[in-house]
Amino acid sequence: MSEPPGAAVSLAEALPADSPSKPLTAQRVLPLRRPGRWIGTAVALVLVAQIIHGLATNPFYQWDRFRYWFLRPTILDGLVVTLEAAALSAVLGLLGGIVLALARLSGSPVLRAVSWVYTWLFRSIPLIVVLIFLYNFSALYQTLSIGVPFGPAFFTFDESRLATDLTVAVIGLSLNEAAYAAEVVRGGILSVDQGQHEAAAALGLPKTYQFTRVVFPQALRSITPNYVNQLIGLIKGTSLVFYVSLLDLFGSVQTMGSTYPGDIVPLLLVATVWYLILTSAVSVVQFYVERYFARGATRTLPPTPLQKVRGGIGDLRARLRKEAAV
């Protein structure tokens, strides 16, 4: 008689009824059959194989031209500009986001209002509009000054001389990034249990010490994954600086595509692969940062990719030994 999947069949139950009873010595568990999983796996493998086959055999992609352009000095110079703009904007945007988040959580209604208006404004305006506006900022204000409002100016300087293409791009990206980072940081601070704030205050710690040593390190566990998503979006957002005359990675690809129209597709593939490399590197850093801040919050740290591979190989060997023993 057949048993339902997952049922345990003992050796004693398999013996005839008139045979002498024997003590239960072993059991064999029949695994559950999962046809849906196998069908889904087969469909996924077929689709992946078709995509790889299409990429490898379609002459339209021109992989020989892809190899030619991938490490060309023009492309690498644009990549350096992308890295520089993204790194500076990420740091300045995070610092600005921390200041805005603290202002939003402060007891001053003026600071809360200013922070809310800034966040609302720059989250509402598209990044390309901000960049183009800043690029033409010198037409509105030819000189900038620092002094008493409606009074004498202490320092005056020419805006057009200071506002280089890279400066405009970094300022625009940083202003936009700070608005989103402010909400990420504020959410991370609010995720810290209120008891931690009370315990730090009960110890008589200064406010600055409470934030830097007690609250913010715990908030980083929540801030890190969310801000890394913003950082990945920032890396991709640097492609817009091409419209303010800064030749980043995408700008270099566009320029070469205009000069060599027959290589547009391989040039776009070059940009795609480089963006994939950059975002993958950021994801790897994110994993180890999250793992670092998980200490003390979880009983066991998340395994690294190498540990996962070793564990999978060990589980496979144990399963094969078990099946061979049966």
Image (spheres, rainbow, N blue to C red):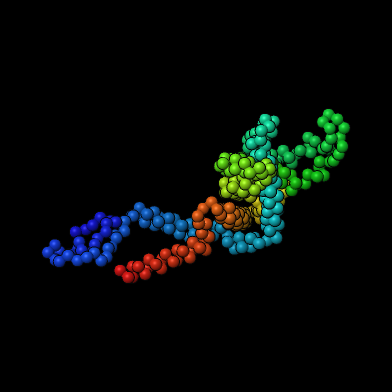
In-front residue for pair 40/153? 153
| Outermost front residue | 203
Image quarter in which the C terminus is found:
bottom left
In the image, taking residue 160 as reference, residue 5 lies left or right, namely: left
Instruction: Residue at 27%, 57% (x, y): give it.
Output: 7
In-front residue for pair 14/123? 14
In the image, taking residue 55 as reference, residue 318 lies left or right, namely: left
Position in image of residue 210 (x %, y %) = 65, 44
Asked if residue 121 shows in the view, the reply is no
| Outermost top residue | 150
Asked if residue 91 shows in the view, the reply is yes
Position in image of residue 46 (x %, y %) = 42, 57
In the image, taking residue 242 as reference, residue 187 lies left or right, namely: left
Instruction: Residue at 86%, 35% (x, y): give it.
Output: 153
In-front residue for pair 68/125? 125
Instruction: Residue at 78%, 35% (x, y): give it.
Output: 140
Question: Where 276 falls versus 157 (above or below)?
Answer: below
Position in image of residue 47 (x %, y %) = 44, 55
Question: Where 296 falls versus 100 (above or below)?
Answer: below
Position in image of residue 307 (x %, y %) = 50, 63
Instruction: Residue at 58%, 60% (x, y): give it.
Output: 62
